[in-house]
Image (cartoon, helix red, strand yellow):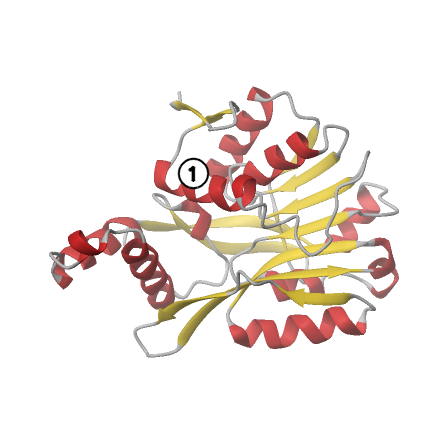
Amino acid sequence: MQEKYVLPNGMTVAKTNEDQLKQLYAEIFEERQYLAYGITLEENAIVLDVGANIGLFTLFCHSVCPSAKIYAFEPIAETFQTLRTNVALNNIDARLFQMGLADRAGEEEFTVFALYNSNSTRVPDLEETRSIMRNKFLANVPDAKKSQMTEEEIQKVVHFFFTRHTTQLCKVETLSRVLREQALEHVDLLKIDAEKSEYDILQGIDAQDWPKIRQIVMEVHGDYLLEKVLPLLQQQGYQTVVGDNKRGLGNAENGRPITLSHVYAWR
């Protein structure tokens, strides 16, 4: 039985990592990062939540637009069960799929971080992930305390979260096949947060299905992916903006800059 946690807005969720939960709540509910630059949720909107994790974006959609029909996708078994619990706790009308999306159907091996499951991914870069965790951790430590910490103490925190990982074979499907199987003729908002799989997910959209998707908001991990995602969206007729919340997360151990961007696209 998972411990319950009451969010600041009164919603109750199954508690996993409390620090991760607070961070996601701030980004999704308080900063409203997915409803910026004119992105809207209108009555009876069809929403695809790809990379749903424990379901905070699904909960947010329901709170903003109770009539929305939400399709949520999460491949990791343990995380999916928490997603299911959170949807049930809040009486949300959502269809849940224990799968990831990709450029082809089949099974893929995911790296699962038990203590920080929002970083679980089918495209692992453990060096980069450790660096991201180190930089996020330091960003939330008061300067007075930070100055007293040794590098060994910092690395212990990183080790605690990211050396405890496993692999899991998960089902993946293309977005176009999902649209056909669910008989969806339009999508009002496609949200993607898939830890470096974002371009592959877009590659799984057939040419005839692009016009069905009105708005897209996605996290893009790294400038190298941003340089692939933006031209693809623009070729499909979308106007695009890279959000002001694009931020650098420092450098990986090999010196490569780490960036995280929010991309907003609409017709």
Residue 241 is situated, as x and y percent measured from the top left of the image, at 67, 66
The kind of residue on which mark 1 rests is Leu
Q: In what element is the residue under mark 1?
A: helix
Give the mark count: 1
Q: Residue at x 19, y 59 (%)?
A: 155
Q: Quadrant of residue 218?
A: bottom right
Left or right: where does residue 102 sit relative to residue 176? left
Q: Quadrant of residue 264?
A: bottom right
Left or right: where does residue 166 sit relative to residue 46? left
Residue 219 is situated, as x and y percent measured from the top left of the image, at 57, 58
User: Is residue 152 placed above or below 1 in the rendered structure?
Assistant: below
**Quarter of the picture holding the C terminus:** bottom right
Left or right: where does residue 52 sit relative to residue 25? right
Q: Residue at x 59, y 40 (%)?
A: 57
Q: Residue at x 53, y 41 (%)?
A: 30
Q: Quadrant of residue 63?
A: top right
Q: Residue at x 45, y 48 (%)?
A: 118
Query: Which of the pair 134/51 is nearer the observer?
Result: 134
**Quarter of the picture holding the N terminus:** top left
Residue 72 is situated, as x and y percent measured from the top left of the image, at 65, 40
User: Is residue 154 placed above or below 17 in the rendered structure?
Assistant: below
Residue wearing tag 1: 21
Query: Which of the pair 266/199 is nearer the observer?
Result: 266
Residue 56 is situated, as x and y percent measured from the top left of the image, at 55, 37
